[in-house]
Image: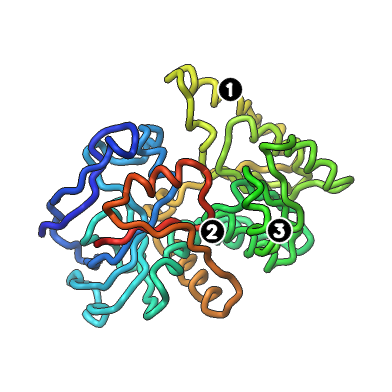
């Protein structure tokens, strides 16, 4: 089967990196479905892959993309034909930037008439947020929780999930135009790291209390700062490394990024009763696909009960792919960015 796709052909700027072309899809697997895509979502890992900083990405040329919305047009022999014609939200292990996408049956949920841009955030970003805050180490009432990149796709959902459990939420942002947005989601304290030292400001706000959890997609020197703020039973969830972006000195910049994170000795973590939890949803999808299905279904259920909402951060067409990637990379976006086929 042939299909149109946005292909990453080289490392570099968005304007140079992508080509719109026809690709060949392998034969559909026995436990897979084929989806005719309406649109796909962007994630910051896509930006890092474009810069050659995401080692999980396939070798070039490749098709990025972790989620899409569309209708099922074919199914594998072990999949019920009742799925054909249904409109679904899907998690894909790359390949999402294509017009037709194959993915596993347990990586889809039916969404009926939920608007594309509203549903899109419930896949990769929703699954990541739910897995960290509800599955691997649930947030509890009255815990103090720090959320980095709080206005982003994962962050905006984490705020709502944490408040739903009765936590005190500290939302870290990088520009004042995001303050009102995270407050409407329920953030108790907002910290702008560009105008003040967030570690000092957070310490003042905590008083004698300590953080129970930090949700950190930044890494770099924020790791040491967060670890100081964590108390006993404190968990640092590391699910990204955006501070690596912007390094101008190649290998030296990467080594400096690693140096800034420091070294956490297991015996020290045990004595302080603190944890560092690495989260890579691609690995979870490979080994425990049922967890992905559970998280996506739970997020959809919470949305349908009006217990969470998603924010449309931008709608682009595939002809505007460069602009969409640049907008996400700029750090100015809020919520979820969707790219529609045209």
Q: Which residue corresponds to mark 2?
A: 131
Q: Which residue corresponds to mark 3?
A: 187
The residue shown at (88%, 46%) is 207
Mark 2 to mark 3: distance in Å? 20 Å
Examine the image and state in which quarter residue 227 appears. Answer: top right
Q: Would you call the spot at circle 2 few (<14 residues within 10 Å), some (14-19), or many (20 or more)?
A: many
The percent coordinates of residue 335 (x first, y second) are 52, 57
Mark 3: which secondary structure?
Answer: loop
Mark 1 to mark 2: distance in Å? 28 Å
The residue shown at (42%, 20%) is 250
Mark 1: which secondary structure?
Answer: helix
The percent coordinates of residue 204 (x first, y second) are 85, 42
Mark nearer the viewer, 3 or 1: 3
Question: In this orientation, does residue 29 appear?
Answer: yes
The residue shown at (25%, 82%) is 82
Q: Which residue corresponds to mark 1?
A: 259
Labels 2 and 3: the sequence-earlier one: 2
Evaluate if marks 1 and 2 touch, with contact meaning CB atoms under 8 Å apart.
no
Mark 3 to mark 1: distance in Å? 32 Å
For the residue pair 6 and 235, the one nearer the viewer reads as: 6
């Amino acid at each position: 089967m042939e299909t149109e796709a946005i292909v990453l052909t080289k490392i570099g700027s968005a304007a140079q990196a992508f080509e719109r072309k026809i690709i060949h899809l392998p034969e559909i697997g026995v436990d897979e479905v084929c989806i005719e895509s309406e649109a796909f979502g962007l994630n910051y890992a896509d930006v890092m892959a474009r810069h050659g900083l995401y080692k999980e990405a396939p070798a070039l040329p490749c098709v990025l993309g972790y989620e899409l919305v569309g209708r099922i047009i074919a199914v594998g022999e072990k999949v019920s034909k009742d799925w054909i014609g249904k409109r679904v939200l899907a998690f894909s292990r790359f390949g999402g930037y294509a017009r037709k996408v194959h993915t596993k049956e347990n990586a889809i949920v039916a969404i009926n008439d939920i608007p594309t841009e509203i549903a899109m955030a419930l896949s990769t970003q929703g699954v990541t947020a739910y897995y960290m805050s509800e599955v691997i180490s649930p947030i509890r009432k009255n815990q103090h929780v720090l959320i980095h990149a709080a206005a982003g796709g994962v962050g905006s959902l984490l705020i709502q999930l944490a408040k739903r459990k009765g936590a005190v939420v500290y939302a870290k942002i990088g520009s004042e135009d995001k303050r009102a947005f995270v407050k409407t989601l329920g953030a108790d304290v907002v910290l702008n790291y560009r105008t003040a030292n967030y570690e000092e400001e957070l310490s003042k706000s905590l008083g004698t209390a300590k953080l129970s959890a930090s949700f950190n997609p930044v890494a770099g020197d924020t790791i040491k700062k967060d670890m100081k703020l964590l108390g006993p039973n404190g968990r640092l969830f590391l699910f990204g490394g955006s501070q690596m972006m912007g390094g101008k000195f190649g290998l030296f910049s990467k080594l400096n990024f690693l140096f800034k994170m420091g070294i956490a000795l297991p015996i020290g973590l045990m004595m302080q009763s603190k944890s560092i939890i690495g989260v890579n949803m691609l690995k979870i999808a490979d080994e425990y696909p049922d967890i992905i299905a559970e998280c996506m279904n739970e997020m959809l259920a919470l949305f349908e009960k009006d217990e969470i909402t998603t924010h449309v951060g931008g709608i682009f067409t595939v002809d505007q792919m460069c602009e969409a990637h640049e907008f996400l990379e700029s750090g100015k976006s809020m919520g979820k960015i969707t790219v529609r086929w045209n």
